[in-house]
Image (cartoon, grey):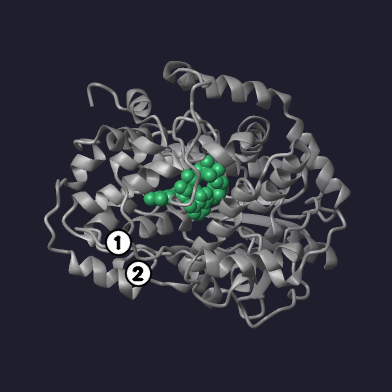
Amino acid sequence: MSGKKRKAPTSAAKEPSAKQQKLAPCKEEKQERAGGWLQDHLKQQRTEKKDMKFNKKRLRFVSKAEDVKQGSKGVLYWMSRDQRVQDNWALIHAQQLAVKENLPLHICFCLVVPKSELSTLRHFSFMLKGLKEVAEECKTLDIQFHLLHGSAGEVLPGFVSDRGLGAVVTDFCPLREQMQWLEDVKNLLPKDIPLIQVDAHNIVPCWVASPKLEYAARTIRGKITKLLPEYLTDLPLVEQHPYTATRTAKPIDWDETLASLKVDTKVGETDWAKPGTKAGVAMLESFIDVRLKLFDTKRNDPNAHALSQLSPWIRFGHLSAQRVALQVQHSGKTAGVTVASYIEELVVRRELTDNFCFYNKKYDSVDGAYEWAQKTLKDHAKDKRPYLYTREQLEKAKSHDKLWNGAQYQMVSEGKMHGFLRMYWAKKILEWTSSPEEALSTALYLNDRYSLDGQDPNGFVGCMWSICGIHDQGWAERPVFGKVRYMNYKGCLRKFDVARFEKQYCPKNL
Ligand SMILES: Cc1cc2nc3c(=O)[nH]c(=O)nc-3n(C[C@H](O)[C@H](O)[C@H](O)COP(=O)(O)OP(=O)(O)OC[C@H]3O[C@@H](n4cnc5c(N)ncnc54)[C@H](O)[C@@H]3O)c2cc1C
């Protein structure tokens, strides 16, 4: 989030009209995706690099036990955040362990639907359809995929004992609930079974990048950049597994599973984002072919189609950020396009958000903000707000500001909001609600319920940056915001064609 330093977008004169734009990206991307060159290219890349070594610094032992239990019947990858087969360091490590011990390989996913307004069809359908693709790929590779029903603590230790498995490898997520699942499994797993965590989401493992809470992008950038030559490597192929399990996985009826979930169906599936790794690779391909060349100059223009749009696939682990970074670097070089600004977002900014949530237990609370920000927000807590809206009014996009309403409406209907508007949107919630605490909880609720990429460290940090100044500095003091950076409608008018956005996304009858 560095809105201020970014260049203002250049003229949109040559772009299609708003009406054309609405249809254009789909057509244009479809055309590019039809090529499908990237799928084949990646397969070839992984095959060529199949002897690539696993860097042991990517893992940490959660249990005291470190060696695979002798006489066991397999190794288990407990898939959680990184829901893909290829380009997944946790699965790569699990397979290498299993091969070394001449054992079959299993994957399990523990399906649990929290009773929450955030459990929506939009999110669970995307996730389950992605997992279905994982299960199908596993079948072709002789890896057993198991869908377990219940939280990991409840179902995983029993499953391991019942199947006689000798080691559990899992991936990494710094969020509270996922950390609790890990703790539960650690406590309940038989003591002679190693529990190994591999950070398959970050390029530089979170605990390697930094052992402490980082203050801002500028304090972590150098640390990550220094380590990239060691960690931003090619990834080897997850191969046909050479040892077959005698007890196979139960067949899964995916449609029935999805239909049986107690999720909020009012927040429905999105049209633009198809779930799964294949669709994620197609979106990456269209970014490389069509949008990458615009990224540097147009990324702050919500009317331009310049962003990668990859956040849902990265959020659900359908795509590996490491693979995206490698491919974008490679394609940028051959196309002579600057990719540094993209790598800054994908690597530095994104890995900073995991750092924040991992080392700051109050990552979703005003109490988790820096002292200067807490003080300044407190000093201005009683300032008169220019408008006051309830959560319901905001949810229904009923503010006086058409730009804000359009952004909110797009998020509710399409499950996405442009990165630049997300900053404006959250800052206005601070301005229009009665306290920073209310603003933060409203912004998180709306973001996490409607954005397909929500419920992710990026979202916690995005809202904390906008409302509580996290990873930012103090600015000139003003009402309500205090020293927290301010954004306004006039600033947006200077950056992009606001009327065009409003016309496209703010329906007349709203
Ligand atoms: C209020 C607010 C809420 C946000 N909520 C989310 C969220 O729920 N989930 C989410 O993934 N991102 C969130 N972001 C960060 C950012 O806006 C999105 O990652 C980005 O808009 C996703 O679109 P894209 O994939 O086209 O991004 P691109 O600009 O193409 O960037 C590529 C990738 O880099 C990462 N990235 C980009 N910008 C940031 C950033 N500022 N911080 C961290 N990582 C970044 C994402 O993984 C993204 O997919 C939020 C930002 C704000 C200000």
Q: Is residue 485 or residue 90 the one in the foreground?
A: 485
> Residue at the spot x=37%, y=60% of the render?
464
Q: Is mark 1 within 8 Å of ligand 1?
A: no
- The mark that comes first in sequence, 1 or 2, is 2
Say above or below: 223 vs 346: below
Res 232 quadrant in image: bottom right
Say above or below: 79 vs 191: above
* Residue 439 visible in the shown view: yes
Residue bearing mark 1: 476
Residue bearing mark 2: 369
Q: Is residue 136 or residue 412 the one in the foreground?
A: 412
In the rendered image, residue 466, in percent from the top left (x then y), is placed at 35, 55
Position of 377 compared to 189: left or right?
left
Q: Type of residue at label 1?
A: Ala
State how far apart marks 1 and 2 are (Cα).
18 Å
Answer few, some or many: residues within 10 Å of disc 2's Cα (few below 14, many 20 plus, some between 14 and 19): many
Q: Type of residue at label 2?
A: Ala
Q: In the rendered view of the protein, which quadrant contains the C terminus?
A: top left
Whether tag 1 and tag 2 are in contact, CB under 8 A, the answer is: no
Where disc 1 sits, the SS reads: loop
Say above or below: 404 vs 502: below
Position of 484 compared to 458: left or right?
left
> Residue at the spot x=54%, y=66% of the render?
218
Position of 121 compared to 189: left or right?
left
Q: Is residue 495 or residue 450 the one in the foreground?
A: 495
> Residue at the spot x=35%, y=27% of the render?
505
Position of 345 compared to 49: left or right?
left
Mark in the foreground, 1 or 2: 1
Q: Residue furthest bottom?
A: 64
Q: How many marks?
A: 2
> Residue at the spot x=67%, y=35% of the render?
288
Res 362 quadrant in image: bottom left
